[in-house]
Amino acid sequence: MPFDLATRRSGIAARGFTLLELLVVLVIAGIALGFVSINAMPSERQALQNEAQRIALLLQLARDEAIVRNRPIAFEAENDRYRFLIREGSTWQPLQQEDMLRERAFQRTPIGLSISPAVAAETNPLRIVFGREPVDKPFLLTFSSGDSSVSIRADGIGHFVVE
């Protein structure tokens, strides 16, 4: 088989990538990485929505605990943190034996809080009490941060929906 320089050059060119092909791949990878990084950092509304989802599940748990324990349990929130309390005689004590209902800080602070209908004895911090009865008054708990707001709607029979 004779040595042919033209055949050898075409063989080398066929096995590698051109500079243009490499640049196209880099541009596509850069665009994909840009989309991933945008989705990795949640917006203010998404962060508030995630926080409200977590709290809605915890409110459901606290309500069920109040019924099972046959003792009132309260959700208490300030603009930087929230916790659950249990009634001990005439005082409220933090629920320490329940890891799920421990005190937590909001992921992004400060958070504006409001409840509708307004609680009769407006307290600071905001407090929602779950009694021993399976039926309670419906309410709308609203969290706001900046221009975003998310609400948890309680129907009074144990369903908590994030809106």
Image (tube, rainbow, N blue to C red):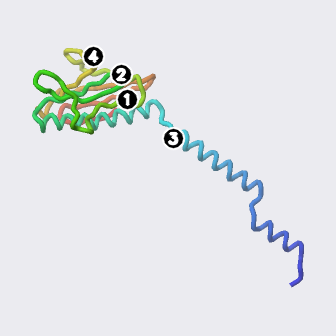
Q: How many numbered marks are there?
A: 4
Residue 79: mark: 2
Is 77 rendered above or below residue 33? above
Q: Write down the residue under mark 3.
A: 39
Is 64 rendered above or below residue 9? above
Q: CA distance from mark 1 to mark 3?
A: 21 Å
Residue 56 on image: x %, y %:
29, 35
Q: Residue at x 70, y 52 (%)?
A: 24
Q: Write down the residue under mark 4.
A: 124
Asked if marks 4 and 2 touch (Cβ < 8 Å), the reply is no
**Which corner quadrant of the image does residue 127 belong to?**
top left
Foreground pick, 163 / 54: 54
Which quadrant: the C terminus?
top left
Residue 82 on image: x %, y %:
30, 27
Q: Write down the residue under mark 1.
A: 106
Is 98 rendered above or below residue 6? above
Circle 4 SS class: loop
- Whichever of labels 4 and 1 marks the residue nearer the N terminus, that label is 1
Which label lies toward us, 3 or 4? 4
- Dot 1 amino acid type: Phe
Q: CA distance from mark 4 to mark 1?
A: 17 Å
- Whichever of labels 2 and 3 marks the residue nearer the N terminus, that label is 3
Give neighbour class at mark 2: few <14, some 14-19, many 20+ (Cα, 10 Å).
some
Q: CA distance from mark 1 to mark 2?
A: 8 Å
Asked if marks 2 and 3 touch (Cβ < 8 Å), the reply is no
- Dot 2 amino acid type: Asn
Q: CA distance from mark 4 to mark 2?
A: 10 Å
- Dot 4 amino acid type: Asn
- Whichever of labels 3 and 4 marks the residue nearer the N terminus, that label is 3
Q: Residue at x 17, y 34 (%)?
A: 157
Circle 2 SS class: loop
Q: Residue at x 40, y 22 (%)?
A: 110
